[in-house]
Amino acid sequence: MLEKLKTLISENLEINTDNVTESSSFKEDLGIDSLDLFELVMAMEEEFDIEIPSDDLENMSTVGDVIEYIESHK
Amino acid sequence: MTGSICGTGSYIPHYTMDNYAIADLVETSDEWIQERTGVIRRHIVKEETTVSMAAEAGRRALENAGVSAEELDLILVATISSNVILPCTACEVQRSLGAVNATCFDLGGAACTGFVLAYNTAEAYLASGVYKTVLIIGSESLSSITNWKDRGTCILFGDGAGAAVLKAEEGRRYLPVTHSEGGKGSALTCRSRNDSNEITKKDYAGDIKEEEYFIQMDGQAVFKFAVKKVPEVIQEVLELNMLEKEDIDLYILHQANKRIVEAVAKRIGEPIEKFPMNLQEYGNTSSASIPILLDELNQKGTLKPGQKLLLAGFGAGLTWAASILTIPA
């Protein structure tokens, strides 16, 4: 799952994801802002056929948070 | 028959407000606003009104087209922020221009899709022979329905007006694609202040929060909607008219946010250079954004005969639409 997410991140946001781990923070470690995150969310929604509402997204600050969310909702 | 754009005009208020001025009102910064929206400053009405800007943009479009006001048989104004309810904005424009032969009505509430829907409406009348010469206008004083205490929205909007004159001409007619999804309307709302009466709803307004009378937006929902639906509707309108994306010279998108325009360009796989932008100077002016941009491109000499333009609007409703037009010789 981490690898898949890293692929989505690099494809959609053109970011080098070599050092990305589950504890990587979107804001601090990846340097992506809220709109980048929306784009990533859209890619994830399409990839995993889920919907992530705004309220839920607010609670996700790390790559691990997102993986956990997808695993429990797909 | 088809409708052909033969002139453009715009009016921009003189008073400007940069991001530093916004940062004096709410907690934000120039850097934050520029990074997330691309907006550097916006123009705000002072002496102007939605009607006066619409009339001036219309006058300039007539002059640019070399068409007299008497020749107009339809004036159509798209607006969500007029200073008048009655008479309609279009009738006020008619009075100002002396367009005595025109039928005039407004296309209200179509918001950021307003100009594309006005274009489609005018085009349908022209193609069917009902009218011959039409003035379409988008004019907005969004500053009057902006919540200047909400940093999520007040950074985005600006005021202004743009107009185009369309004439019935021989030539290929491109069919538009339009969509509405009322079920998702709560993503972008603004309640009318005219929702009570002295007889049965006297205290009705007591339950309503002041911020509901201003534009309220679920930023994530609207961003995702735009980035998903605009590429789709572009693809649909190309397929419907048997064109390829390479056939389009310029994509004229509603100027909501630089990041939306960039994401759309990326998703359809077209170079960002084909997506002119002016939102850095004006912010999001809703129905006025596309005709202001068209007028700027026209005045700069960017538009060349034979070029194909794809217009795409998207916004409250939710509504979204795309049209293709050719720049006439």
Image: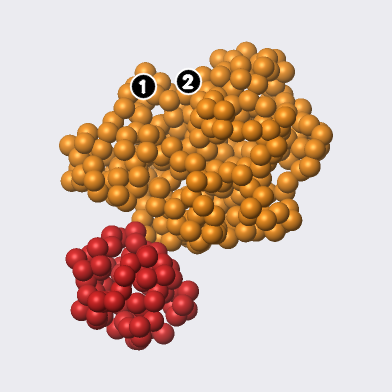
Chain colours: A red, B orange
**Residue B23, located in which quarter of the rendered image?**
top left
* Residue A50 sits above or below residue B65 on the image: below
* Residue A25 sits above or below residue B38 on the image: below
Which mark lies nearer to you, 2 or 1? 1
Number of numbered discs overlaid on the protein picture:
2
Under mark 2, the amino acid is Ser
Q: On the rendered structure, is B261 left or right of B231?
A: left
**Nearer-the-camera pick, B239 or B23:** B239
Quadrant occupied by the C terminus of chain B = top right
**Nearer-the-camera pick, B105 or B235:** B235
Residue beneath the point at 51% across and 61% down? B267
Q: Disc 1 on helix, strand or loop?
A: loop
Assess disc 2: are there few (<14), some (14-19) or many (≥20) residues with their C-alpha within 10 Å of its C-alpha.
some
Can you identify the residue that label 1 sits on?
B14
**Residue B134, located in which quarter of the rendered image?**
top right
The subunit letter for the residue under badge 2 reads B
Image location of residue B231, percent across then percent down: 55, 58
Can you identify the residue that label 2 sits on?
B52
Image location of residue B147, percent across then percent down: 30, 41
